[in-house]
């Protein structure tokens, strides 16, 4: 069993999803694929996504703990 906060975060993350690319992002994406190849761009995006997910989880965890501390201080 994973840690409970990670499970809550993963449920939250699935519901939020990702945002669609803007025209500017799509243009950069297309140039990168043409220069580096589709596989290399996919590897880069996958690696960056993992890093961003961990950073988002760290923020989520800190916020959750802060909220819990605030609720406990109100008792």
Image (spheres, grey):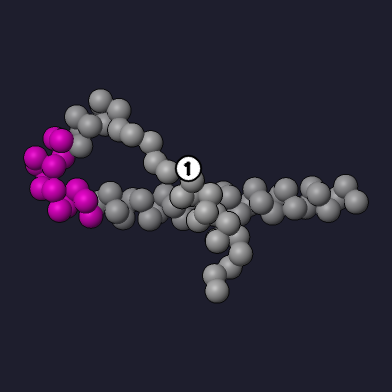
Residue sitting at x 33%, y 34%: 20
x and y percentages locating residue 31 in the rendered image: 14, 35
Residue underneath mark 1 = 16
x and y percentages locating residue 34 in the rendered image: 9, 40
Q: Secondary structure at mark 1?
A: helix
Magenta segment: 30-43
Residue located farthest toward the top when viewing the structure as drawn: 23
**What number of labels is visible?**
1
Magenta segment main secondary structure? helix
Left or right: residue 74 versus residue 52 is right
x and y percentages locating residue 63 in the rendered image: 65, 48
Residue sitting at x 23%, y 55%: 43
**Other residues around mark 1 within 10 Å, as few (<14) / some (14–19) / many (≥20):** few
Picture quarter containing residue 8?
bottom right
Q: Is residue 31 magenta?
A: yes
Which residue occupies the foreground of this view, 33 or 4? 4
Left or right: residue 8 versus residue 68 is left
Left or right: residue 55 versus residue 73 is left
Check the image and report above or below for 14 versus 23. Answer: below
């Amino acid at each position: 069993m994973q840690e409970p906060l990670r499970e809550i975060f993963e449920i939250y993350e699935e519901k939020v999803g990702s945002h669609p690319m803007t025209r500017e992002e799509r243009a950069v994406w297309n140039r990168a694929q043409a220069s580096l190849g589709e596989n290399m761009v996919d590897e880069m995006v996958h690696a960056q996504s993992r890093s961003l997910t961990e950073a988002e989880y760290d923020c989520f965890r800190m916020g959750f703990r802060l909220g819990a501390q605030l609720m406990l201080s109100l008792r």
